[in-house]
Every structure is written in C-alpha cells, then in structure tokens.
Amino acid sequence: MDTRLTPPPLGLYIHLPWCVQKCPYCDFNSHALRGELPEDDYIAALLRDADGEAAAAAGRVIETIFIGGGTPSLFSEDAIERLMQGLRARLPIAPEAEITLEANPGTLEAGRFEGFLAAGINRLSIGVQSFNDEKLRILGRIHGVNDAIAAVEQAQKAGFKRFNIDLMHGLPEQTPEEALADVEQALNLGARHISHYQLTLEPGTPFFTRPPRLPDDEQLADIEAACHARLRQAGLERYEISAWSLPGEACQHNLNYWQFGDYLAIGAGAHGKISDSSGRIRRYSKMRMPRQFQQYAGSPEAIAETREVTIAERPLEVMMNVLRLAEGMPAAELLARSGLGRDDLQPALARAQSQGWLQSDAERIAPTELGQRFLNDLLGLFMPEVVNPQTDSRNGA
C-alpha cells in the first residue's frame, strides 16, 4: 500500500433542509416547514459554518458546489444571492465553478429563476419525478404535470443552459408505457441531462411501513429496457447507473463524488469527505436538526460525527463510488486518491474479471454491463474481510 495521497478535486455540498411537506418515500434529512421559513437565520448559520470549513480548503480551490435539500428553491433569490456572496468572501471558489441548485416545481414564484441565475447559480436540478398526475399524487408531490412543464420552460426562458430533470421509475403500478411517456416528455422539453432512478422503499419512511404495490422484477426489467433504449436513441449516454446525459453535460459535482473526490459540507445534516497529503481520509457530518445546527454552526460542536477511513476500508469505499460509473476511473488516479497500492486490489480485481464483472484493462478500472447489473455482488469482493481476511478494519492495519 502507499499511504501518500494526491489530494483530489474539491467540491462543496450545502444542505437546505426544509420542504413544504415530506414525501412518503424520502429518507433524506428533510423537514416539513412549520410556519415561516427562517431564511435570514439559516443563511447566517451557513456562513458561520463556511468559516469553520475554511481551514480545510486552504491551498485548494472549490471546483463545484451543489445546493441540495430539502427544497432549496423555497429560499428566495435574495437569500441565495447573500449565500453565494458570503461563500465567495470566505472560500476559494473557482470563477468557472459548476454551481447546482435543486428546485421543485410548485415552490417557484414567477421570476425566481432569473434571480437564481443572477446570484451565480449556473445549473438546476429540477425534481419532477413523473409527468403523470396520478403518480405524482401517490408520491405525495405538491406539484402537477403542468407545474413541472412550466418549471422547465421557465428555467430555459430565464437563461439556464444546463439543467437536470429528475425522474423516478418503478412507481406504484407503473407500466412500461407510463415510464416511457415520462422519458419522452423530458426529452421533448429539451433535457440534456436526466437522472433516471428506481423508486426504493427505504427503512423509516411511510412507504416502507405501508408499501405500495410496485412493479415486479420482470416488469421493472421491461421498464428499464424501454426507457434506456429511448434515452440512447436520443443521444444520451448512461455515464452512471442512474444518470444519463448528452456528451459534455455530465454533472461535475456528482462525478467528483463517484471519482472519490473531496467535498466540504455545510448545513444541517450535510456530509463531507476530506483527504490530506499525510494519507488521512476523513468523513464527517453536521448536526441533522436545523435548530441545533443554527445554534452551533461554525463551532466544533456542529460536527455530529467524524471518522477516519482506514486502509482496510478503502477498497470498498472507493469501489462503491467508482463502479457506479460506466467508464470507471484510470487505475493510477484511483490509487493516488485512495492511498492504496495495486497489490491491495489485485486479488479482488482478478476475481471480478473472471466473473465478467470488470473490464480487463490494466490502465482503467471499470465495470462491464454485467458488473453494473450485479453491482452488489461485485462490491462484495472488495469488503475488508474478503480483500484481507487477516485485517481488522477497526484499527487500520
């Protein structure tokens, strides 16, 4: 192993935790809004939190920013502008940084997109989920089809050249024809990037407690086959398991996650990852509850959890991200960012190649289509007890 690290690109994740109401499938750190949105107090807390992150960014440049939630588009354009101005005064943000904001139809006033663009947001992720009113009702969404179409059209009219449309498939009692109609509508609206992911029932959600009737495995396969064929026909490439884009339109912030990059975290429940030249990789998260976070933002007490990623854990940590990418990652770059040596991975790589799950290319580590289909089995080969049965992952040996 080589415990020296080449610091990877640096991003910034910002969490705005409030929604109008919480959807029954959602297990993110989101909170239904009760009363008035505390814009001023929360923006001030975010900027104090950014002060606390400045040391970790020293000597580096933030190349991407993602503002997620919750529903960030509940915040006014003035609040987002104050946030962006404050961040640029505190952190080394590249002038050409990709800056994405999540926006939900039904939470947008006329003209707000123009304000977001003027504030420095240059990419939107629009949470449509479906262009079917009945499916939206079942999912607990507050918008309808017309709201979704209007939101995408307003974003383009405002001047946004880069935007993503979020679509779910495998919805309750969804047919392949209904799923394909969602994809078709997104394409008709000019989407150059589509997140197309399967609805899953997550523990702790109402859908997990009272499961709706979902398509079976055979129906899901038919849905995916129909939708994937249409996306490819439209020229979009599946660059990640759930992400499709035209060439040059991939989300750079998410690519940084999947390529084992670093990212700072500010906001209630935000997660971060930082590595340094000494060989340490640290993951951390902030307090989840907004009121607590606002109280402690900018102080060490705002950090709810921090842990060092041990050498024994790194093969799985790396592969859980990299193997989501259709093209994987250059082997030399992967090793430099993880502090691993080729010998640390070689037995697992050889077993995966023998199963037909990895491409046999010494210069790049990438899954085959079969490998992505059996991703959980593939990842199992990189678990600490499998990679090195003699290693105790708790002590980093």
Image (spheres, helix red, strand yellow):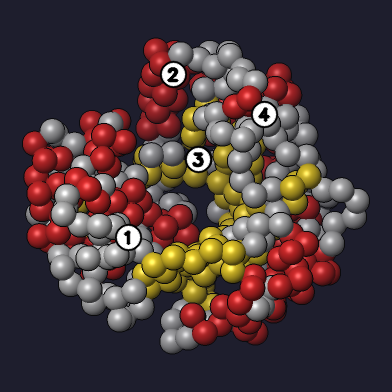
Residue 215 position (above or below residue 246): above
Task: Nearest to the eye among marks 1 and 3: give it.
Answer: 1
Q: CA distance from mark 4 to mark 1?
A: 35 Å
Q: Earlier in the sequence, mark 1 or mark 3?
A: 3
Q: Position of residue 237 (x, y in %)?
A: 37, 40
**What residue did someone put label 2 on?**
220
Q: Earlier in the sequence, mark 4 or mark 1?
A: 4
Judge the density around disc 3: few (<14), some (14-19), many (≥20) Cα neighbours within 10 Å: many
Which quadrant would the N terminus be assigned to in this image? bottom left
Residue 39 position (above or below residue 382): below
**What residue did someone put label 3 on?**
195
Badge 3 amino acid: Ser
**What residue did someone put label 1 on?**
394
Q: Are marks 1 and 3 in contact (CB under 8 Å)?
A: no
Which quadrant would the C terminus be assigned to in this image? bottom left
Q: Earlier in the sequence, mark 2 or mark 1?
A: 2
With 131 as the anchor, is 115 left or right in this view? right
